[in-house]
């Protein structure tokens, strides 16, 4: 029997999967979360669900929020199932599902005034955000807040009529300040180095455009803890929706599928209290940076490295790319020789063992994470996951051939056609500019790395520019597979 996911059907569903042992009526909201996508529901919401099942944190329920059309579509799906989510955890040897009930509402652009009212409510003590790397209005090359972005200029000129996530957060903070209410903590859950610092720079930077004194107050009084988050969570499609129905008998309009592994490392820096997340496996540390560097460079950098050879060789899934001998050898050598040397020591962690475990996670066939997902939005991901590694390797005198090959593979992908002749759909907000640069680079490779908004001054490095030139020419002349072989055996 198949049951639609709802509070009314939880008793029937409980015969097949774990459901919340807490009552929705006992929950009150303490968190507003912007960006109610799959990752948030497989990560932060799961930790809170575990804490609530232990009889705690009932004053820390989540109100979701968002300003995009995607957020509105997600709200409509979740509202129809009482904001419940089926989370399906998949390891190579097992599959298990449970239902989470920590979310009590979702507000979207249509509810903007209610959103600001909610942020001003003293009960809300944390505002968390998962808005992707591109949502912070940061110049990729400089790493600085982009005050000239049209959306930011608009909110800066009209702070009382905000349209962006950060503008809405500022409106809520301003009301709290006026009323003498303790400011909420702003917690970034995005894969960005120093994500707390980045969030502070973006929010205070926006405030500074209209009210410099308010910006100073934010920097002095609002907590922005840095965080490292980790759980591979693919996009949901018909495959996952049908699997949830057929395997667990649950009709969930947007179930979340993820790996069994999860990790959350947090600075213990909160202005108005926090849930006791350490009781459910969250690690609180004075300095997140070592963990952050490890994860962003080894895992996210690894994803960014295999995305484009995977696409160029017409591979659909991440685990299939890892089974490909040439891609697997490329990633292993790149991690060992060029990425790991740039990662500082991490307490009680062997970096090579961590890299091995990451590659094993990539091989999990049940996750069915797509190469297309990894290839999306390279103009935001490459400057955060790959370019800083290149800079550090050059600074230390290390090799950059593999990193140059990553950049060349991205360039070759942005040309728009795989080695077999398959055409790629646009997959980046900057697709037109990237494709124009990629086409120019076919005859003059320097035209790609001279994109200073992405590569900064790297085009001025003879070592990197020479390696990039060699790699891109090889991809066009010898093809992707032969180029990967030559890199792995040291003859590129």
Image: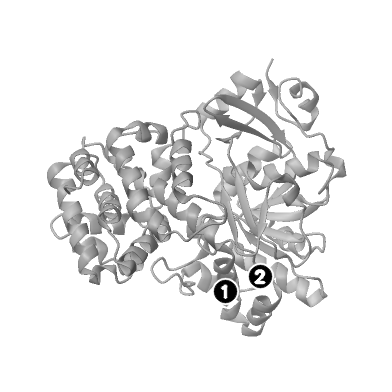
Residue at 26% x, 52% y is 405
In the rendering, which numbered label is found on residue 9?
Answer: none
Residue 356 at x, y percent in the picture: 44, 41
Residue 426 in sight:
no
Residue 417 at x, y percent in the picture: 24, 42
Residue at 68% x, 42% y is 46
Q: Nearer the viewer, residue 192 or 63?
A: 192
How is this picture coloured? one colour
Residue 123 position (above or below residue 354): below
Residue 227 occupies quadrant: bottom right
Q: In the drawing, does residue 490 fall left or right of residue 28?
A: left
Distance from disc 2 to disc 1, alpha carbons, whole Å, reads 8 Å
Q: Extreme right residue here? A: 26
Pointers 2 and 1 in contact (C-beta within 8 Å):
yes
**Residue placed under numbered mark 2 in the picture:** 170
Residue 485 position (above or below residue 368): below
Residue at 13% x, 57% y is 443
Precedes in sequence: disc 2 or disc 1: 2
**Residue placed under numbered mark 1 in the picture:** 206
Residue 345 position (above or below residue 365): below
């Amino acid at each position: 029997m198949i049951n639609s996911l709802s509070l009314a059907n939880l008793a029937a569903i409980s015969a097949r999967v774990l459901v919340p042992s807490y009552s929705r009526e006992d929950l009150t909201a303490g968190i507003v979360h912007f960006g109610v996508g799959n990752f948030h529901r497989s990560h932060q919401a799961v930790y809170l669900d575990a804490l609530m099942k232990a009889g705690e944190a009932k004053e820390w329920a989540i109100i979701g929020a968002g300003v995009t059309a995607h957020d509105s579509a997600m709200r409509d799906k979740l509202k129809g199932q009482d904001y419940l989510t089926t989370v399906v955890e998949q390891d190579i040897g097992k599959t298990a599902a449970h239902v989470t009930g920590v979310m009590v509402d979702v507000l979207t652009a249509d509810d903007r005034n209610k959103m600001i009212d909610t942020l001003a409510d003293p009960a809300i003590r944390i505002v968390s955000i998962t808005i992707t790397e591109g949502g912070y209005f940061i110049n990729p090359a400089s790493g600085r807040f982009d005050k000239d972005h049209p959306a930011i200029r608009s909110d800066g000129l009209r702070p009382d009529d905000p349209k962006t996530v950060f503008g809405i957060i500022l409106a809520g903070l301003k009301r709290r300040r006026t009323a003498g209410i303790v400011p909420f903590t702003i917690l970034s859950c995005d894969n960005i180095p120093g994500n707390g610092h980045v969030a502070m720079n973006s929010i205070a930077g926006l405030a500074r455009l209209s009210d410099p004194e308010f910006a100073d107050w934010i920097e002095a009084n609002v907590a922005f803890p840095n965080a490292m988050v980790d759980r591979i969570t693919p996009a949901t499609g018909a495959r996952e929706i049908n699997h949830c129905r057929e395997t667990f008998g649950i009709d969930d309009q947007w179930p979340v599928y993820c790996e069994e592994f999860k990790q959350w490392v947090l600075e213990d820096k909160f202005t108005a209290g926090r849930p006791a997340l350490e009781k459910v496996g969250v690690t609180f540390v004075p300095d997140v940076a070592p963990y952050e560097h490890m994860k962003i460079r080894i895992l996210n950098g690894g994803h960014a490295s295999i995305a484009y050879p995977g696409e160029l060789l017409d591979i659909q899934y991440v685990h299939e790319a890892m089974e490909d001998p040439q891609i697997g050898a490329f990633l292993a050598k790149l991690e060992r020789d060029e990425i790991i040397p740039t990662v500082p020591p991490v307490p009680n962690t062997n970096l090579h063992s961590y890299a091995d475990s990451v590659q094993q996670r990539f091989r999990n066939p049940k996750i069915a994470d797509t190469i297309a997902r990894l290839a999306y939005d390279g103009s935001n991901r490459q400057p955060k996951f790959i370019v800083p590694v290149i800079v550090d390797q050059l600074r230390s005198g290390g090799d950059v051939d593999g990193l140059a090959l990553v950049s060349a593979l991205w360039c070759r992908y942005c040309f728009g056609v795989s080695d077999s002749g398959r055409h790629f759909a646009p997959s980046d907000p900057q697709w037109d500019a990237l494709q124009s640069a990629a086409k120019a680079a076919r005859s003059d490779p320097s035209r790609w790395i001279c994109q200073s908004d992405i590569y900064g001054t790297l085009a001025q490095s003879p070592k990197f520019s020479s390696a990039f030139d060699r790699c891109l020419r090889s991809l066009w002349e010898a093809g992707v597979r032969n180029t990967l072989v030559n890199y792995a055996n040291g003859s590129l």
